[in-house]
Structure formats: structure tokens, C-alpha cells
Image: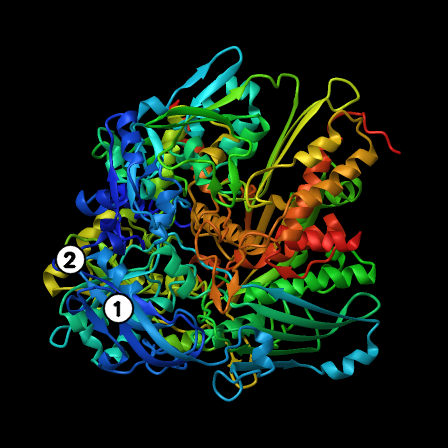
Amino acid sequence: MSRLLDVLREELKLTGTKEGCGEGECGACTVLIDGQIVNSCLVPVAQVEGATITTIEGIAHEKDLHAVQQAFIEHGGAQCGICTPGMILAAINLLERNPNPSEIEIRTGLAGNLCRCTGYMKIFESIVKACQSNR
Amino acid sequence: MPEHPFGKSIPRKEGRKKVTGEALYVDDLSFEGMLHGVTVRSPIARGKIKNIFFEGNLPWDEFTIVTAKDIPGGNFVALILNDQPYLASETVNHPEEPVLLLAHENRYLLEEARRNVRFELEELRPIYSLEDALAQKEIIWGDDNVFKKFLVDKGNVDEAWTNAHLILEGEYRTGAQEQLYIENNGAIAIANSKDGVTVWGSMQCPYYVHKALVKLFALPEEKIRVIQTETGGGFGGKEEYPSLIAGHAALLAWKSGKPVKMIYDRAEDMVATTKRHPSRTRHKTAVSEDGKLLAMEIEFIIDGGAYCTLSPVVLSRGTIHAAGPYYCPNVRIKSQAVATNVPPHGAFRGFGAPQSIFALERHFDKIAKKLGLTPEEFRRRNFIHQGETTATNQEIRERVDMEGLLNKALELTDYHAKTRRFATERAGNVRRGIGFASFMHGAGFTGSGEVYLQSVVGAEATADGHIQLLAASTEIGQGTNTIFSQIASEALAIDFDLIEIMQPDTSKVPNSGPTVASRTAMVVGKLVESAVLGLKQTLVGSGLLADNYSSSDFQKACREYIARFGSLKTSATYQPPPNVHWDDEKYQGDAYGAYAWAVYVAQVAFDEITYEAHVEDFVALQEVGRVINPVLAAGQIEGGVAQAIGFTLFENVVWQDGRMINNQMTNYIIPTPADIPPIRVYFQENPYAYGPGGAKGIGELPMDGAAPAILNALENATGFSFNEVPLLPEKLMEGTLAQS
Amino acid sequence: MRGYIPGYELVTPVSLDDALGLLATDGWKPFAGGTDLMVLLEAGKLTHLKYVNIWPLDELRGIEVTPDSITLGALTSYSQVQANEVLVDEFPMLCQAASETGGLAIQNRGTLGGNIVNASPAADSPPALLAYDAEIELSSTTGSRWLPYYGFHTGYKQMLLQPGELLTKIRLPRNKTGWIHYFRKVGTRKAQAISKVCFSALAHVPDDRVADVRLVFGSVAPVVIRCVNVENSLRHNVLSATTIDTARQLLQKEISPIDDIRSTAPYRLQVALNLLTDFLFRLGPQVNTD
């Protein structure tokens, strides 16, 4: 029954995925399982047998940042950074499903990722800028 | 990278680490042989500890157990009054008060152990409200339950009532608010009598922790080392609290001889750590027939919880801001911070001002209504101007244009047209309203506080010609690293990328004061500027730097200097601006060196079926001296407004027997991306002579205006006057049904 | 994290039959997406220790459509509900409920089956399922049986689930074309919220009479409750100020909201009344003032 979150952080030493609440409310522990976002604090590791898991460490390609990562740095999407890995994975997942989301679609896609620093405005702007740079 | 980065949206200096998951927060660190630590806490609010039992079928001999008896130095958290123990020994004064500490290498077994410690306690009668504290139902602290009192007395209030055309009274309340940084409190410690104590942790003020550990361990200053790890939000919640968790981790490390990591889970962090002080403000105001303020009598009370912590300073700021950006010839403010048997309240962005400003701006809308004036006209007739004095008799020496800000804010929000439209319009089951609040926020420590702090910043050139900034000011998301680099780079006219920020580590950086009070840009930033200019002076003086130099010339000069003389290092110490006079006894004079001025406007929609109120549009307009980094500055305002919207409409601490029982994110509600309206931020500039590049402080300002603006808007929407926050749908229903 | 992880067992069966075999033995319970059970575990409140991991069982997934009905595997996630065209088209309240449960990360893992057997009166999908006359299939080593979902919950956290039974399918009859749908979840915020009041209503109003109606509330009783007394007062009647008033009176007696950590009884009652009234007013211009 070990949490996927703990296996990632403690056994695999992938500390980019964070624990914010341990109850599936804040999204700081967001990872992708077979391309879908989940709260890794709520997943028993036994249930990911055979699955492909993507964490924040798997996003940049060596020196090259993903457009969303770059946009977060330039447009204020990250402040303290603790929600950022989860937020970026949720944002990337959103853009994969919907390359040109409306503001409502961005808000809905990120509704499970809480941020206490930004008030969300610059997170939305960063995502919009990332879309623009992708075109 | 531009060599004149001041005023530009330079990307966050540590941004790359944060977006790749490489930034290391305290729980990401691990040490060989490390144990985990937990705190065992009081189950009751007030009582005497009779006995402690270690139950369950557990290998207790494997655990490190620390009680108050194990404390090498003083059992108190050094802060203001030093009344808060690290570990309760004979009595407990609030639920969740730390009593003993446990450590073990197995995290799961440790939790099991925590569950199996049982206390035998003799209960004493607790008090939970500020009313009961004032009424002295029980004396639970000192002689009278009062941590601190202030009296501000300007002119002659008592005589003014007789000349009044109108006298209006009102009572306003605010509730507790949890900071809810997404990274919980945490610390790792290594400690032994030979080497001393080293603590890594999530914190805002390394030197506060340092000061507390010196006393806890009775060790000399050089034997205590405090290092700030990447910190996932603070907002004041990691101003004083980290001293407690750092001390706990260190005590376990001291006793076990091993590194100890202590990380709170969310439930513990919410139930046991500090929150915003609940408040009650009573106003009595006299106005003339033409709507001018004649007298203001204000009583401001805050609930400090069981121990003093920072209550005197919160009270101070709330008191000084209670009469707002207005001119009134007669003002009396009586304020008190009182004790109750709940976990101590502490710093949270705004620090007393959101509480007293809420009361004032609600009260002023009511006065306007009673006088038959619009809220904006009443403000216009009373705004303070250059040359006039505040409630503490501070003469405003800078140019201030609140009328201009107000007009601009109303224009940006189409306020007048909307006010007319919303008065009659009813779309489906939704009624709308628009309202505003006008306010100011003083930056830096009050009065002589900055002189007392004697902040120091260092700057050092490295062998490869980079400039290292040495300050205890922490990056907690607000942009310290970036703006310090911008200030330094601008002052020296060298590449932004040549500036490095030394990780705040008390063995390596001087004490530039705490990262609080909206002082980091304005006060410490100025010292950064001075320190690096000192480096430049040294180089010029040594003949190694010509008048017209490039970035690489500067680098070369540094390398040359170091090769010749060994090191190149300067420091700058705080100098107060001239003509700042403050009388601590009478609480009169120049309370703050600079104020930021603001008008915030909120448009709300009230749903008549569910009684929910939503903010649909929010405009935040402020004059801040000078904007150092537009993206970071706007980010501060947006984040603060979002927290203030939470404070107003969502965040309710549910208390039972002195304990927060909704201590889970499921039940303590902060806004999600689906809940926050568009927040539109506008800045005006009016350079402050003593801030770097003219900048004032802005970190706390955005916390002050949303609550009164939203409640003013809701009164316009519903016709009902609400005087308390948080204002949840259940209360909105009571009010609107009571009307019909 | 308060759960004592080493104390739990989670075994993965190789097939549905294997799972049922385990569930038939003493002390095993099913574990699906974990969005409820893991929260309890982490709070140190998950008292049951032995679980069968049914998550890999694809026999419990899939959505089958026939002309008369649509059948969903118990492990159908909220995301899968929202992605199905027939559900979007003919069962919009179920899709709306799914979209308002948690956020996307929860919707990818939470399942309808898990939601039903978690038996919370505050669940979001059950009101829609009841309004749509859902039936559920329960399977065990001795076979399968279908029963109406209506009446399945008999009391707070109690249901007609026999020891060893696993909820395997949910079926909705496709017979609500032309009906008026109304779903509203009132939570503490717009996403990631447990409901304070939840209302799912359907009405068939072919002329000036209410031919048929379903009125279901969540979070106002120990179970998700279909208000049959209110329904009966409306069925076959013309909508008027009087019938609406009677319906409101009956509602007050049929539901029993409480004060709890999220809200108050008076609020829940008043909002329930407002939602019912709003729904009835929308049923057309048939409302005559008496």
C-alpha cells in the first residue's frame, strides 16, 4: 500500500514531485500515469505495475526546457515553486489534449492544482504564452 | 542580459531550478543515518500534566524521547516576551501544545508511537474568545490576559462630539486565517555539544531561528548555524514559527546523536501553527454637515492565542493603520492584544492592518450612506494630503494623490455606470454590486524598528569576477533573488548574470533583518545598492576601474584586485532617513518611512438561490514608488488579492474546544483556479527618495483592500450590511432572509 | 501521513473470478481507484486492512450501448463518463456530476462503482444515477443479480450489499428523451469541493401536466434521497403556485439536513427549497397564479 509519491521521492530519489496535503486536494504531487494526470499521494504503488509514469524530471530534454517551463520562468508562473512541478504537468497535459484552450478550459484543466502565491493570473498567462510559442 | 535591468521584467533568477524540479526544499534533503522526528501534543486546551504513559506494544527503547527536562539551555522561544516554552513541562495552555518529542528511523512506526503516548491531565477552565479574555472570565496570562496595549491620542476627541452633525458607531470582526503555504513547515538538524547545532529549514528569518537556538542550547553564537532551504511559501507563517520546529528537530538531534528530520503533515501544520489574529474593531465617528471627519474613536482588539509571540507588533501595525489615509483632527485609538487558550496566533501578510482597515473601510461606506453622500465623495472630502498629519501626527511629506487614484480606479472599472445598472438589473437569480476600498500600507518596521534592527548587507567579488550578495533576506517566492540582482546590476551597470545570491546561511551572511514587513525591497534592497557601490568605489579608488567600463572590464578589475590583495568585500549598514522621529511612549510621530497608497475595486455577483457571492472582476490600483520588476510586482499583488479574497469569502477556521477541527485542505477552503476572478493590476510611480531606485514596499499591501471592497459591493448588491469576515453563504443567507 | 502502511495488505487478483473468490473469504474488501480509501488511510482513519486490488480488472470497465440502455462497468472513471457521447447526449446530469467531482486528477482515478459503495450521502454522481433510474449488478462467487439502485442505500453508510458481493455494472435505461434535466451541486467552491447540497431533477412535461418527475437530493439526509412524497404530489398535476407550495412543504418533511463541519441545517434546507422551486419554475409557463 506504499504511496506512489513516497516511492518516487524516497526510493527513486525523484524529489521533484512534492507533498502538499496528503489528501488529493492540492495537486502538488501530480504525475502522469499513461498520459493522464493523477495525484500520486492517492495511488498505491502496486497499481502502477506496467504503467509509464512521467514526473517533472522527465519533461526537459537536457538543457532544453519545455515551452511551458520556459513560459513559467519568463511570465511569472512560478513564485515559490512548490506547486510548480504539479502545475506544469497539469498544464502540459491540458495542452496535449487541447492545444488552444480557452480561459475556462485552462481554469478547469488546472482546477485540481492549488497555488497560494500567484493568484493564478500569471499561471494562466504563462500557459497562453506557451501555446503561442508552440504555433 | 540587459545592463540596466531596473524596471524590467527580468525572469526569476532561480526560475530554472523551480520549473525542472531541481530546487531543493527541506523535505528533499536526506542525511546518512537520519532519523525522523515528531511532536507529541496536548489533547486539551488548559491543564496540568500529571503523568505521561508510553503504551501499545512498541519497542520504546528504540525511540529517542525528549521532554522539557532534556533542554540544555532555556525552555523558551526567544522572541519578544519569551513566554512560550519549547516543550510544556507542568502546564499546557492550548490544544496541540508541544509536550514531548520522539525520533525513530522508521517514519510509519514513529506515527504509531505518537498515537500511543497518553497523557494524564488535570483540566483547568479555558477561555476561547477575546470577549472572555477582556471580561477576565479566567486569568490565563499575566495579571489580566493582556499581552500589550496601545493608546494613540491626537487632538481632543472628547470635545468633538458636541459639534457633530452625525455620530455613527459600528462593530466589525475578522476571523482567523491559515497561511496555507503549499510546503508544510519542516526542519533538519544536526546537533552535538562539540560541533554545535546546524539546522536546515523552510523559513523566512534565519537570524530569528539563530537567536532562539542560542538560548535553547545556551551555546555561543558561532556554535549555531541556520541555513534556509528553498522555501515553498511563507506569508508570515514562517516568520517566527520555524524557531519552534527547528528547536525541536535540534533537541532530538542533540539527544540521539543523529541527524533528525521533522516535517509536518498538513493536518498538523494547520492545527498547531500560527494563524492570522482574529479581531474586533469598534468605531465611533463624528462628522460635520459637509461630510468632514471631526473625530474618530477606535477600539481595536486582537486575539493573540496562548502566548505572546508577535502580538505586540501585530497590534502596533493594526493600530497605526486603523484610521487610514484620511485627515482627521481628533483621533483616539485604544488597542489591546489579549490571551486565549488557542494555539498562538502570529504573522500573516498585512499583520494587523487587514483587520483594522477592513473595519474602517466598511464603516466609511456606512457613514457615507447615512450622510446621503456617495462612498467616493465621502472619501474625497477626507483624504489626507501632503502637509497634513496622520493619526499618529506624522506629517505626510511626499506628494500623495488619493483622489487621483480613486478617480482612476473608478474609471478603470466603469464604476459609475455599473453602480447605476446594478441598482435595477436582475439577471436570472443574480444580483450584482460594485464597491471599493481606499487605503495605505506602511513599509518597513514601525518607528525606530529599523534602527533597532541595524541591518547589514555584504557584497563580495569572487575570483572569477562575479559579485556575491550576502544577506539574510530570504527568497520565499516573492522575488528577493531577482530584485536584489537587478538592483546590484543596475547600480554597477554590469551584466545581471554576474550577480550571485549566497544562500542565507548564518555562518556566511550578515543579519539584514527578517524577511517581513514589506521591507526587503525598500530597506534591504537599498543596502544591497550601497554595498555594491562600495565595491565599485574600492575598485575605482585602486585605479583598476576607469570611468567608462563594460561588464567584462568590471569582471577583470575584480579578478585583478583579488589577485593583488586577496579579497574584495564590503558591507553596508542601515542608516535611517533624516527627519524620521518616532516617540515609542506616546506612540506619536513618523510611524513609517514610506507608505504605498491604493484603491481596490471589486465587482461581485450574489446568487439568490445558493446565497453564494463570487467576485467577477477585481481592479487593484496602487502607487508604489517605483516598480523594480513589473511581472514580479504584479505577481505579488495578484497573489495577495487572491489570499484576501480567500480571507473574505472562503476561508473559515472552524473551532471546537480551542482547536481547529477543519484542519484538512478538503475542509479549509482556499480558492482554486476556477474560483479566482480576473485580477487587473495597475501601478503608479512616485519615487521614494530612500528606496532603491525609488521603490517602496508592496508585499503586504494587497492583503488590505479586498475584504472591505467586497463587502461594500455586497451591501450594494443585497442591501444588507455585513460586518464580519469570512462571509460565507450561510451568513449571507441569514442576512438577506432577515431583510425580507 | 498518519497511516501505518506496513499494516495493510493489497493483493492483486488475476481475474474477476479470482477477485470474487478472495472477496468471498473473510475480511477482504475491494480497492478501486483509491480516491476515497487513500484519503482515509493517510488521515490514519482506514480501519479495514485487507484489500483486493480490482483496478487492473478490465472486465469491470467498458461502456455498452444498446437501443434500450447503456451499461457502464463499475470501474468507469469520471473522465470516461464525460468522454462518452451517449452519456453526454442523453444523461447530461451524470456528466455534469462527473465534471464537478474533484478536479481532473481525481476524475481520472475515481470510479462510479467506488463512489456508490463508498455510500456517502454527499456523493455527486448518485443523485444523477437515481434520477435516471439506474440499476446495478452485484456479483459474487454464486452468480450475479440486478437490482434497482433506488433503495440500495438503507441508512448512513449502509447498503444492500451482501458479504462477498462486488458491484460490477451500472445500467441506465435510455428513456428520458424530451425530459427536462436540472443538476446543481452547491459546494464550498467551484472545484475540489464536497457538496453542501446536491440536486438532480428530471421532469416529463408533455402538456400542462407533470407526467412524471424525479427529485433527488444529496447532502440533506443520511443517504442520497429520492423525494418520492414530493414527486407524488406533482405527478399528474398541473403546476401552479399551490402545487409548488405543497411540494415545498413536503420537501421540508422529507429531507433532514444537519449541521456539520461544512455547513448548517438551515442553509441546506433553504437552498434545497430554492433549488426545487427554481426547477419547478423552469418547467414552463404552466405555472398559474392562484
Regarding residue A85, the answer to whether it shows in the image is yes
Q: Is residue C219 left or right of residue B96?
A: right
Q: Chain of mark 2?
A: B
Q: Is residue B590 left or right of residue B535?
A: right
Q: Nearer the viewer, residue B554 or C209?
A: C209
Disc 1 is placed on an element classified as loop
Give the residue at mark 2: B31
Label 1 CA crowd tier, 10 Å (few <14, some 14–19, many 20+): few
Residue B67 position, x and y percent, is 26, 76
Amino acid at the residue labelled 2: Phe
**Residue drawn at (69%, 71%) of the image:** B283
Q: Quadrant of residue B208?
A: bottom left
Q: Earlier in the sequence, mark 2 or mark 1?
A: 2
**Residue drawn at (56%, 42%) of the image:** B677
Q: Is residue C210 left or right of residue B706?
A: right
Q: Residue furthest top?
A: C67
Tag 2 and tag 1 share a subunit: yes
Residue B732 position, x and y percent, is 67, 52
Residue C67 position, x and y percent, is 52, 10
